[in-house]
Image (spheres, rainbow, N blue to C red):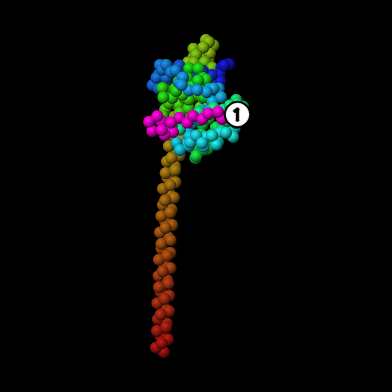
């Protein structure tokens, strides 16, 4: 833990494939491929690697002129190399920018990361191919970052730094009762106590069972009585409604008869 750092000081494919850099076995084939790779940095690349920035996730339409316009605000630029496909000449979406001064390099590294250029949020880091010992590029199973969908995330870089390992105490012996005899005796006594409590609980449950049955029976009789009373009230209500309707009809007939008698007079 004393020498732990979120950013890798030396590239190790096995550690890069682990979220905290503690894996002992590779978990995907790409890590195996990176461990077996013998990569030699491109000797044809010129310039000072310690003054060079790596710029990725560029819009494929972004040009060298646009990069110069944006990154020249941090200091004087010596050279820009936008990586292109050898056959089609189209941009591959990343570039290298070499500054004249370290101060400009550090400022751009600090402020330009996640800057939006041509509707794309870019990623900025130092050049690692010639500065990080043991570097393996992404195409050989190495690199840093990556997408979750690929299942080949790489940690230890600026995009995905290592997470600090969590050291848990070794609790296995005590958990399985393999510690001191004093603890084992306590465990056995505790077991006897639990068994005693279980028996007591079973007995009390047997005693409570008839009471619950009586309670449920009482509840059933109560529900039946309530149901009967509700039906009786319903019948009484219907009888009252019928009598009211009959009384209203009789009153209407009497009123009509009285009108007829008055007309004949």
Q: Is residue 106 above or below residue 23?
A: below
Quadrant for the C terminus, please. Answer: bottom left
Q: What span is colored magenta in the figure?
A: 77-91
Q: Is residue 140 left or right of residue 104?
A: left
Q: Is residue 252 visible?
A: yes
Q: Residue at x 44, y 46 (%)?
A: 222
Q: Nearer the viewer, residue 145 or 250?
A: 145
Q: Position of residue 78 (x, y in %)?
A: 55, 28
Quadrant for the N terminus, please. Answer: top right
Residue 250: quarter of image: bottom left
Residue 50: quarter of image: top right
Q: Is residue 227 left or right of residue 156?
A: left
Q: Position of residue 194 (x, y in %)?
A: 49, 21
Q: Residues within 10 Å of mark 1 (few under 14, many from 20)?
A: many
Q: Position of residue 87 (x, y in %)?
A: 38, 31
Q: Residue at x 42, y 45 (%)?
A: 221
Q: Nearer the viewer, residue 7 or 208?
A: 7
Q: Is residue 5 above or below residue 208?
A: above
Q: Is residue 163 visible?
A: no
Q: Nearer the viewer, residue 52 or 209?
A: 52
Q: Residue at x 50, y 20 (%)?
A: 130
Q: Is residue 23 above or below residue 263?
A: above
Q: Is residue 192 above or below residue 210?
A: above
Secondary structure of the residue carrying numbered label 1: helix
Q: Residue at x 60, y 31 (%)?
A: 75
| Residue 84 in magenta stretch | yes
Is most of the magenta stretch helix, strand or loop?
Answer: strand
Q: Is residue 219 left or right of residue 5?
A: left
Q: Nearer the viewer, residue 51 or 154?
A: 51
Q: Look at mark 1 in the image and give the residue it sits on.
A: 104
């Amino acid at each position: 833990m004393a020498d732990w750092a979120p950013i890798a000081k030396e590239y190790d494919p096995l550690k890069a494939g682990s979220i905290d850099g503690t894996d002992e076995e590779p978990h995907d084939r790409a890590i195996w491929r990176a461990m077996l790779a013998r990569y030699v940095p491109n000797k044809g690349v010129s310039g000072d690697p310690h003054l060079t920035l790596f710029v990725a996730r560029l819009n494929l339409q972004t040009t060298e002129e646009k990069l110069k316009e944006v990154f020249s605000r941090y200091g004087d630029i010596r050279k820009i190399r936008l990586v292109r496909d050898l056959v089609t000449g189209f941009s591959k979406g990343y570039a290298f920018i070499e500054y004249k001064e370290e101060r400009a390099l550090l400022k751009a590294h600090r402020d330009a990361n996640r800057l939006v250029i041509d509707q794309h949020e870019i990623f900025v880091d130092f050049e690692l191919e010639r500065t990080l010992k043991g570097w393996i590029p992404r195409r050989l199973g190495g690199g840093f970052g990556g997408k979750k969908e690929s299942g080949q995330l790489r940690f230890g870089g600026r995009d995905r730094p290592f997470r600090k390992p969590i050291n848990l105490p070794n609790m296995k012996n005590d958990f399985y009762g393999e510690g001191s005899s004093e603890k084992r005796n306590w465990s056995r006594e505790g077991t006897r106590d639990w068994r005693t409590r279980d028996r007591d609980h079973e007995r009390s449950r047997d005693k409570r069972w008839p009471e619950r049955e009586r309670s449920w029976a009482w509840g059933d009789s109560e529900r039946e009585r309530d149901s009967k009373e509700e039906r009786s009230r319903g019948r009484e209500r219907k009888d009252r409604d019928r009598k009211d309707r009959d009384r209203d009809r009789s009153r209407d007939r009497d009123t009509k008869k009285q009108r007829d008698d008055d007309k004949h007079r």
